[in-house]
């Protein structure tokens, strides 16, 4: 099993920055890629960004250029640097990990709230 714990969510004003962290523990050797998803009130959970074990990255069009995903393998931690935040970025942000065997996002964190005000 893998445990994921997010942190870094906060209330900020539009244009400001935040960095989210996701610390992984447990059977981390089974993890392949990791990703960030978000869910705004009344909306479905949506993909934000992902990073593979080889550090290839992928972003949703809505956050491309503004957000950067990175990983520190020594700390078993994935980060999401969010710049130029907009009110529409307000959501609960979830960290997810892909199991190397199943290929599915089998592991999820509890989420961290990001609120961006005008």
Image (cartoon, helix red, strand yellow):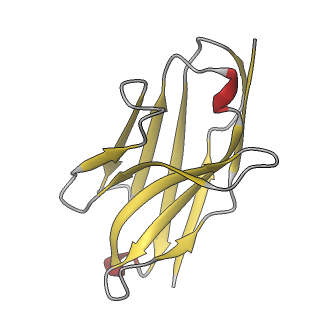
Residue 84 at what x, y percent from top left? 52, 16
Count of numbered tags: 0
Above or below, 85 relative to 91: above
Image location (x, y in percent) of residue 44: 69, 55
Residue at 33 percent of width and 49 percent of height: 71
The image quadrant of residue 66 is top left
**Whether residue 49 is situated above or below residue 106 in the rendered picture:** above
Q: Nearer the viewer, residue 93 or 5?
A: 93
Place residue 74 in its image quadrant.
bottom left
Quick one: which residue is furthest to the left in this view? 54
Q: Left or right? Give the position of 83 relative to 33.
A: right
Q: Which x, y percent locates residue 30?
A: 34, 81
Q: Is residue 11 left or right of residue 106?
A: right
Residue at the extreme right of the image, as rendered = 42
- Lateral position of residue 38 relative to residue 54, left or right: right
Q: Is residue 64 shown above or below 33?
A: above
Along the line of sight, which residue is nearer the eye, 63 or 95? 63
Residue at x 58% of width, y 68% of height: 108
Residue that appears at 58% across and 21% down: 85
Which residue sits at x=48%, y=71%?
25
Q: Where residue 115 sits in the image (x, y, percent)?
A: 74, 30
| Image quadrant where one finds the C terminus | top right
Q: Nearer the viewer, residue 34 or 64?
A: 64
């Amino acid at each position: 099993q893998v445990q994921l714990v997010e942190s870094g969510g906060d209330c900020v004003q539009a244009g400001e920055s935040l960095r989210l962290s996701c610390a992984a523990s447990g059977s981390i050797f089974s993890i392949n890629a990791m990703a960030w998803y978000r869910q705004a009130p009344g909306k479905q959970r949506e993909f934000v960004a992902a990073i593979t074990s080889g550090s290839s990255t992928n972003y949703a069009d809505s956050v491309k250029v503004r957000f950067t995903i990175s990983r520190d393998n020594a700390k078993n931690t994935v980060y999401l640097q969010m710049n130029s935040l907009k009110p529409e970025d307000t959501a609960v942000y979830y960290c997810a990990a892909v199991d190397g065997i199943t290929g599915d996002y089998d592991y999820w964190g509890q989420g961290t709230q990001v609120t961006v005000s005008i």
